[in-house]
Image (tube, helix red, strand yellow):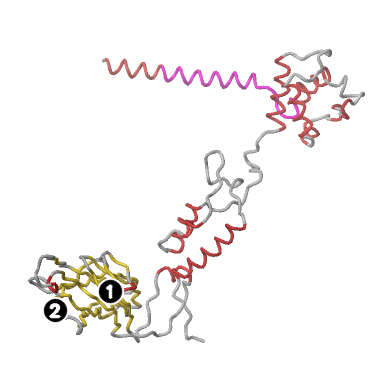
Amino acid sequence: MTKCVGILLCLILLGFQIHLVTARAETSQKTRKPAGDAAFQTRIKPLLGKYCFGCHGEKKKGDLDLRVYTDEASVLRDRMTFAKVAKNLQAHEMPPEKKPQPTLEERELITSWIQSEVFKCDCDHPDPGRVTIRRLNRAEYNNTIRDLVGVNFQPADDFPADDSGYGFDNIGDVLSLPPVLLEKYLAAAQKILSKALVTDLKPKSPVKHFDADGLDGTAPGESLGGGTKRLGREGDIFASVRFPHDGEYILRAKAYGEQAGPEPARMSFSLDDKELKKFDVTAEEPAPQVYELPVHVPAGAHKFSAAYLNNFRNPKDPNPKNRDRNLVIHYLEVEDTDPSQPPVLPQTHKRIFFSQPTTDT
């Protein structure tokens, strides 16, 4: 029973609301004010004649004769004049103090008509006004290059700081384009293309050679001359290598150990930080040994690293040669076992040159 009463009450309230809306709509239809030229002829033009034509009629004070505006169309052809009319009315600058003054309602009526009819927005044919062709700010430039080309670096980090306005750095009217920024754009374009494109497709030597003392890594070390590097503690040295195609390669390092302690120096090979194999480096100076590992590698850029694994120090050993174990590396190499295979172009290259030439004539 309670549910029925509640439902009935809701229906009654809903019906009441519908009745109210309908009644308001009917009232609105009855009391709707004239618009457009009808409003100008019946409501605005009489007020202009009453309060404005005395000065801005036959006398043409300020070179203005409002009598020439006989209908709404003539008003719309001279919007700037009526913008001044609305401004002076709102500021109570017109009519002059000694002249008859319109009531507040009459002032509001004229200014409201000017705002709603003379400067109305045509939603069917909107005018967005002047649109500034703006440049990308630094963050947008980096993100656009990343998404568009696929290179993994921040070319806009070298750009000068973006101008800001109203707390934002992406406003077109604020973002300028000074000559130094244009130069930075050109330099960034060169860097982007050099990273994205493979420009030399000629067959190369099957062996890529990297002197150890020219490589970065986590292992503290010192150069011994001739490209050789001594690793004094655990850590690695690595080379970034582009493998031109999927296939078999040989990873290689020439090394020897400065032996000390109960075991020989130990070295490992890793590809992209994944350990592949460990070697006991039993070779000693002056007879370094070449250590190598055949491995299948997919095409693309990969990180080949050689790591020193078991540093040893005993400064109290009576034999000076047995106090410190080190790993000495001459070089790293990567050998392509099938260099005749055509290189696989990276995605960054394919995004720019998405069609390749053929032998068809």
Q: Is residue 11 left or right of residue 266?
A: right
Query: What label does residue 229 carry, if any?
Result: 1
Q: Amino acid at mark 2?
A: Thr
Residue 311 left/right relative to 174: left
User: What is the tally of numbered marks visible in this picture?
Assistant: 2
Find residue 282 and name its label. 2
Identify the secondary structure beneath mark 1. strand
Residue 306 image offset from top left, x and y in percent: 24, 72
Q: What amino acid is at disc 1? A: Lys
Residue found 24% across the figure and 78% down from its top: 253
Query: Residue 212, position in %: x, y?
Result: 30, 75
Q: Residue at 77%, 20% (x, y): give it.
A: 93
Question: Which of 275/92 is in front?
Answer: 275
When the figure is inspected, residue 139 is found, relative to residue 246, above or below; the finding is above
Residue at horizontal 24 percent and vertical 80 percent from the top: 254
Residue 133: x and y in percent read 61, 52
Instruction: Give the mark nearer the N terminus: 2 vs 1.
Output: 1
Q: Toward which corner of the image does residue 96 lie, by quadrant?
A: top right
The Cα–Cα distance between marks 2 and 1, rounded to whole angstroms, is: 17 Å
Classify 10 Å Cα crowding around label 2: few (below 14), some (14-19), many (20 and above). Answer: some
Q: Secondary structure at mark 2?
A: loop
Q: Nearer the viewer, residue 326 or 79?
A: 326
| Magenta-tinted stretch | 13-39
